[in-house]
Image (tube, helix red, strand yellow):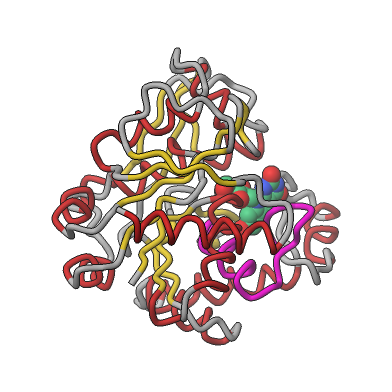
Amino acid sequence: MIIALSGGIGGAKLALGLSHVLPPEELLIIANTGDDFEHYGLTICPDIDTLTYTLAGLDNPHLGWGRADESWAFMQTLAALGGPEWFRLGDRDLALHVLRSHRLHAGETLSVITDDVRKRFGIGLRILPMSDDPVRTQINTDKGWLDFQDWFVRQRAEPLAQAVRFAGVEQARPQPALLDALRAKPRGIVICPSNPFISIEPILAVPGLREAIKASGAPVVAVSPIIAGQAVKGPTARMFEALGVTPSAAAVAARYGDLLHGFVMEHGDDAAGIAPRVFYATTLMRDLADKINLARQVVAAVDAL
Ligand code: FO1
């Protein structure tokens, strides 16, 4: 079993590549839930949904979130009624949020709902949240602590991120099937090319998870989301700078510390100071072939450790 930790668009792209390289029963994707939030009275889970839509081939490649086959009557009507428009929900996407919120209110766990939805989308492999308990990423700025989506979407990640915290993580329990998979001597653990601060570290912050990863004895391989000092997408590079760290592949490897056995980074990028064993690959995923090739390289790195 390969267990992949994923958040954001980069994570979903590699997850898609891995789904073409491994049989479904040998791949478990763990989604960050720190981006989740309540909006219009709905519980919205962006990283779970980006993974689900991407693995179902329904994702909107231009936006990097939501669905390709979308209509916007809800948002148009909401706007006409004076509702907040900054977080856009397509009509089809909205059905998922309404159903998930309804089932959560009825007492079902996020895992049960997520697993049912991925099956209904015809996805063979398991997608699971890092925890069924609520964890909410917050960003500290000169305007004070902001909820993640307010900072990332409504304020377009413009306020400088001086610190990140994960509200509720102290009380969160790791997803049970994830713990079982970690105890069953997995083939390897992959940290996808996601933003370390807001997509991966919320997962690693769930009490007991980092220890369970280490205790699994499995090789841990991370893929750099930074190429030549630049993030492929999103605020990763700027978040390093805001923390006084020069953005680089080495800075990402250092963020994960002693957890890593291997680190996959872009050909020609500077590997100086990177402790884990370095593997070079084409980490920019422009199309499905790139995603599959990178996934193959990542699995080869896992097996080489
Ligand atoms: N991101 C935006 O920049 N603007 C949006 O209006 C927006 C809507 C949205 C709706 C559903 C969903 O699952 C994700 C959505 N996102 C939007 C992306 C989301 O903020 C990010 O994907 C993650 O939280 C960061 O990885």
Query: Residue at (61%, 46%) from the top-left corner?
Result: 282
Between 198 and 214, which is closer to the camera in this rendering? 214
Residue range (magenta)? 43-66
| Quadrant of residue 233 within the rendered picture | top right
Image position of 250 (left or right of 189): right
Q: Position of residue 220 (x, y in %)?
A: 31, 51
Query: Residue at (46%, 80%) from the top-left corner?
Result: 24
Query: Residue at (17%, 57%) from the top-left corner?
Result: 217
Task: Indicate yes or no whether the magenta region holds residue 224.
Answer: no
Residue 87 is at least partly visible in this image: no
Image position of 173 (left or right of 73): left
In the rendered view, would you say 211 is above or below 271? below
Task: Indicate yes or no whether the magenta region holds residue 65.
Answer: yes
| Quadrant of residue 187 within the rendered picture | bottom left
Q: Position of residue 209 (x, y in %)?
A: 22, 53
Image position of 293 (left or right of 217): right
Image position of 214 (left or right of 299): left
The quadrant the N terminus occupies is bottom left
Query: Residue at (39%, 33%) from the top-left corner?
Result: 253
Give the total number of marks visible in the rendering.
0
Q: Position of residue 208 (x, y in %)?
A: 17, 52
Between 80 and 140, which is closer to the camera in this rendering? 140
Between 90 and 8, which is closer to the camera in this rendering? 8
Residue 78 is at least partly visible in this image: yes
